[in-house]
Image: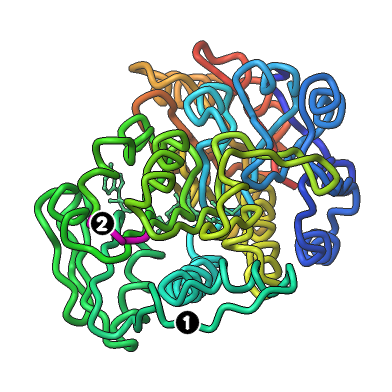
Amino acid sequence: MSARLSVQKDKLKFVLLEGIHPSAVEALARDGYTQVHAHAKALVGDALAEAIGDAHFVGIRSRTQLTAEVLDRAPKLTAIGAFCIGTNQIDLPAAAKRGIPVFNAPFSNTRSVAELVLAEMIMLMRGIPEKNAILHRGGWVKSAANSYEARGKTLGIVGYGHIGTQIGVLAEHLGMRVVFFDVEAKLPLGNARQVASLQELLSTADVVSLHVPETPATQNMIGAAQLAQMKPGSYLINASRGTVVDIDALVAALDAKHLLGAAIDVFPVEPQGNDAGFDSPLTRFENVILTPHIGGSTLEAQESIGREVAAKLIRYSNNGSTVSAVNFPEVSLPEHTGKCRLLHIHHNVPGVLARINERFSEVGINIAAQYLQTNEHVGYVVVDVDASASEIALGNLCSIEGTIRCRILY
Ligand SMILES: NC(=O)C1=CN([C@@H]2O[C@H](COP(=O)(O)OP(=O)(O)OC[C@H]3O[C@@H](n4cnc5c(N)ncnc54)[C@H](O)[C@@H]3O)[C@@H](O)[C@H]2O)C=CC1
Ligand SMILES: O=C(O)CCC(=O)C(=O)O
């Protein structure tokens, strides 16, 4: 890894993967970042390493796996933009230890997911997926069997965060009762009610919708035992992460007709891009709505995410601000007009700030402003100095013991 970065704006290289909305490229260009390389697909292995090998900034969505090994092959990487909510595809501690903050878009696609889930719930309760398939085959089955109104039914939301809360509010407009399970105590919106256990939710709800992040605790959170706890004739919706549901157990519950249907947007293994094939044991069920991880894929959401995450990368690059970084000490910084700003990222061990100040004092550099924030692993110091002292200051900063990387802002 190169500890020192001192590169003019128009030389900083951005690599954007997975068809990130052009609003990101436009925002970057407006701010003078013209070295932007956009790819339509996710990349893996050597192709990924080659694409990001000399990049200063990388933008991805949910598909690209940025492991510690991949990060080691991108020595100039300064920050990562996750143009989505989930950041489970990035080794966040590994990025922090390499001095790389990760930014995401925590809200911009949440309404899109909520609307899709609401629509799927109604479609499932009316048996539309099977009826649609029958008509496409030239058949006609006009029947009210297994066809229900949403009104008066109970929706169980697992993970009552930005998405779960919006679905709860929308579902109440349909006259549904809403219960939710969350590991945290949450403010219930409307008449929603928090239940004490996942089991209570599963045994109460007519429709269960999952909105938890991918974590060790949510891995296979819905397996055979949990599916058995769901009411006979209920429905499961998963638009969170593929690892949350044990697909084989879901197949068994559908085969047994314990569940009347399901809607699945996310899968344990997803194809790399649009021309790759998809296979799943769920494809044989006409009462299962399968969608290609498009919960957040609306033009409104993608345009907004493009702007939002690009703005965070630009702010970090121009100003050093790390507000809303998901793995890094957060510092909100004022402008540094008339001064030169230096960023110093170091291992969070005692005495680094003292050493910086001693060193600057020894070489006679006056510090105009200084900011420090730390987390468990990383310390982040920002120092404003006179432009005339900047090169000497940068040299001194980079030689401080414990330095991960340092950077000068123009
Ligand atoms: N299908 C798609 O296109 C999209 C999928 N997502 C997925 O949806 C997830 C949820 O998104 P948001 O609602 O915005 O996240 P959020 O962070 O606002 O809410 C997640 C909620 O889950 C709760 N939670 C965490 N672990 C839990 C556990 N073990 N048991 C019960 N509750 C738990 C948290 O306390 C929090 O309230 C994201 O992490 C992402 O993986 C997000 C956007 C689009
Ligand atoms: O649209 C995407 O690329 C990913 C959406 C998603 O799953 C997320 O935002 O976490």
Mark 2 and mark 1: Cα distance apart in space: 21 Å
Measured along the vertical axis of the image, is residue 335 above or below residue 149?
above
User: How many C-alpha atoms fall within 10 Å of the one at disc 1: few (<14), some, or many (≥20)?
Assistant: few
- Residue annotated with mark 2: 232
Q: Residue at x 50, y 58 (%)?
A: 263
Q: In which quarter of the image is residue 167?
A: bottom left
* Magenta span includes 232: yes
Q: Is residue 315 visible?
A: no
Residue 379: percent from left, percent from top: 43, 29
Provide the major secondary structure of the magenta segment.
loop
* Magenta span includes 351: no
Q: Nearer the viewer, residue 363 or 198?
A: 198
Given the image, on which type of amino acid does mark 1 rest? Ser
Q: In which quarter of the image is residue 112?
A: bottom right
Magenta span covers which residues? 231-235
Quadrant of the image containing the N terminus = top right
Q: Which of 333 and 212 is in front in this view?
A: 212
Residue 339: percent from left, percent from top: 65, 50
Q: Tell whether 295 sits left or right of 369.
A: right
- The residue furthest top is 401
Q: Which of 258 and 390 is in front in this view?
A: 258
Measured along the vertical axis of the image, is residue 54 above or below residue 178?
above
